[in-house]
Amino acid sequence: MTIDELTFDAAGLIPAVVQQYDTREVLMVGWMNAEAVRRTAETKRGTFWSRSRQEYWVKGETSGNRQHVKQILVDCDADTLLVLVDQEGPACHTGTRSCFENGEIEVAA
Amino acid sequence: MTIDELTFDAAGLIPAVVQQYDTREVLMVGWMNAEAVRRTAETKRGTFWSRSRQEYWVKGETSGNRQHVKQILVDCDADTLLVLVDQEGPACHTGTRSCFENGEIEVAA
């Protein structure tokens, strides 16, 4: 499949779920535009578009906690990516391994 | 954490990554509004907002492939959910277990 075949949203973005390839832990969700997908595939470093700062960012570029990209899977609607990586150190800017250690919505007993 | 503390996008939606709780397979990504989050937490059935049909849908309501919700985790920005489920049968409407069996973007060698 090619990047041209992906469906981007009105802002030109597609959500990318990042998962540790061996333990299958979901680490984070970032957003990519077509160029970020291209850079991620070409450089094998998780590269995203920051919606708040309106700029590209490469995971680990400042922190050193790099993502070594193994595979980029596309979902059935071609509007979501699942990026399998080998994550060095914590994936979250808060210092936790995963971004999903922040809290939870209580589910009925 | 409460639903009021979540950050929804301009359309009032939050992406929900759905993961099989034991194997950690990522099954699908759906979208929820606040009411869909509330229904998912209360009924323990994955409940989403269809952006194309503009209506609620409960996973498995027609197919029988229900999602038994175990946990709803919130990410560091409170703008993405990770929903841990026990998925009956295929999660994808195409009949595959996961929605991410559709293809991939080739990563450089």
Image (cartoon, coloured by chain):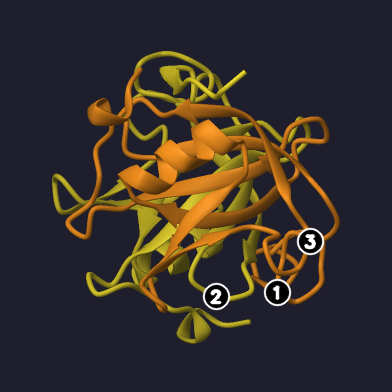
Chain colours: A orange, B yellow
Residue type for callout 2: Ala
Mark 1 to mark 2 CA distance (whole Å): 9 Å
**Residue that label 2 marks:** B78
Say what amino acid the circle numbered 1 marks: Gly
Residue A31: where, in percent of width, then height?
A: 43, 56
Q: Position of residue B91 (x, y in %)?
A: 48, 27
Task: Say if residue B45 shows up in the picture.
Answer: no
Residue type, mark 3 in image: Gly
Disc 2 with disc 3 on a shared chain: no
Q: Is residue A46 above or below residue A84?
A: below
| Disc ID at residue A64 | 3
Dot 1 and dot 3 within a common chain:
yes
Label 1 vs label 2, nearer the camera:
2
Which residue does the image show at 35% across and 22% down from the upper left? B93
Circles 1 and 2: CB distance less than 8 Å? yes
N-terminal of the pair, mark 1 or mark 3, is: 3
Same chain for the residues at labels 1 and 2, yes or no?
no
Badge 1, how many Cα within 10 Å: few under 14, some, many 20+? Answer: some
